[in-house]
Amino acid sequence: MTLSFTRTANTSPTSEERRAEILANPGFGSHMTDHMVTATWRQGEGWIDAALEPYGDITMSPAASVLHYAQEIFEGLKAYRHEDGSIWSFRPDKNAERLNASARRMVLPELPVEDFLTSLRLIVEADQEWVPAFGDGEKSLYLRPFMYGSAAFIGLRPSTEVKYSVIASPAASIFTGGPKPITLWVAEKYARAGAGGTGAAKCGGNYASALAGQIEGAEHGCDQSVFLDSSTHTYVDELGGMNVFFVMKDGTLVTPELTGTILPGITRLSVLELAPEFGLTPVERRVPIAEWKDGVASGDILEVFACGTAAIITPIGELRWDGGTAPSTAGEGGGEVTRGLRERLLSMQQGRTDNTYGWMHQLV
Ligand SMILES: *Cc1c(COP(=O)(O)O)cnc(C)c1O
């Protein structure tokens, strides 16, 4: 049975003038739209009280399980306006599947794919004026579905009440004047996830555990940090919120295989599927950090890039670690494959090319 959502319009939305001001310079994640989606799940009842309502604060018991035991998961995807005014998102069915995979790992209830897609459609429909215009750089409306345990009980057990919500926030390209290569710090002291842990689930706690490694990188003048496997500290896992790829001289496009500590990115999956278009063979395997350090110097590695919904594809420049550096192969704005894949994905998302793979899903 699919959920039916009640709808309550925000009667005091952001003024048109203020919204135009925000859309001219949205930044990332600081401005929310006028509506939100909410739904509740209760043990024995399932999903109830699904609603589109005015954006606003939430109240919960100080004993709510999420505040103590971090039973929380989220998703992130973007809505793009196409030239004819319609609004689309990129492979949202994959986000729905991943939300449910995360839910299973964190013992939260699954949300039917149909209801997830309806929740996206409802908020984008209500806040469609917040979706940046076609052709306005790389701007989009970022959608943030999330779910958390809200039952008031200080004791360790899966929450008997859970909230699902979607909020939306206009986003600019995180680059001005094209993507600039980012400098990476190898976080050798910290891991973001461990074997048997929650690295493959999109849960808030993974981000909290990555922060210290991220800060350590910033202290060494780096934009981001790359995490290694927690058991041997010798294999590349991923960045705090992006997967990593290597363009090899031998014609392979390599990314670390999913061992359970890596988040299965939808951009990652799409890049693997697009590799043949670029004459490259996609390979998922373990990548020793030593291979990266040596490979960029020897020329075996031609390009390195990171990928994820927020930044799409970002060229990776210099690699730094405690005691050394490896040179950038990214030039000014990334190598040929990095730039080509970026434009391939972006043109699809913005509707400037055919929906050949059927990856684009119309919301409005
Ligand atoms: C969300 C996320 C990614 C990127 O996933 P996409 O589906 O491509 O946006 C990569 N790594 C981590 C840790 C993430 O949380």
Image (tube, rainbow, N blue to C red):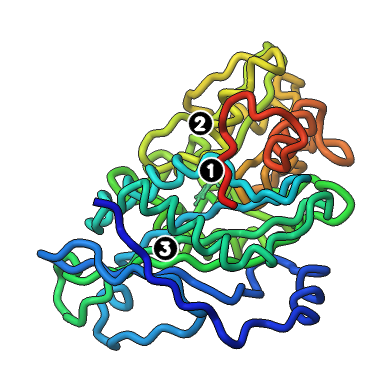
Q: Which mark is residue 238?
A: 1
Q: Amino acid at mark 1?
A: Glu
| Residue depicted at 14% across the width and 76% down the height | 155
Q: Amino acid at mark 3?
A: Phe
Q: Nearer the viewer, mark 1 or mark 3?
A: 3
Q: Which element is circle 3 on?
A: strand
Q: Is residue 278 left or right of residue 102?
A: right
Reading the image, the residue beneath label 2 is 256
Q: Which mark is residue 269?
A: none
Looking at the image, which is closer to me, 341 or 258? 341
For mark 3, does the 10 Å Cα neighbourhood hold few (<14), some (14 to 19), or many (20 or more) residues?
Answer: many
Whole-angstrom CA distance, mark 3 to mark 2, is 27 Å
Q: Is residue 160 above or below residue 314?
A: below
Task: Give percent across and percent down for residue 30.
Answer: 65, 74
Q: Find residue 312 and report its image quarter.
A: top right
| Residue depicted at 45% across the width and 52% down the height | 191
Q: Which element is circle 1 on?
A: strand
Report whether residue 210 is seen. Answer: yes
Looking at the image, which is closer to me, 294 or 13? 13
Q: Find residue 215 and report its image quarter.
A: bottom right
Of the numbered discs 1 and 2, the one sitting upstream in the chain is 1
Q: Which mark is residue 146?
A: 3
Mark 1 residue CB less than 8 A from any atom of ligand 1:
yes
Question: Are the residues at dot 1 and dot 2 in contact (C-beta closer than 8 Å)?
Answer: yes
Looking at the image, which is closer to me, 362 or 136? 362
Q: Is residue 290 above or below residue 105?
A: above
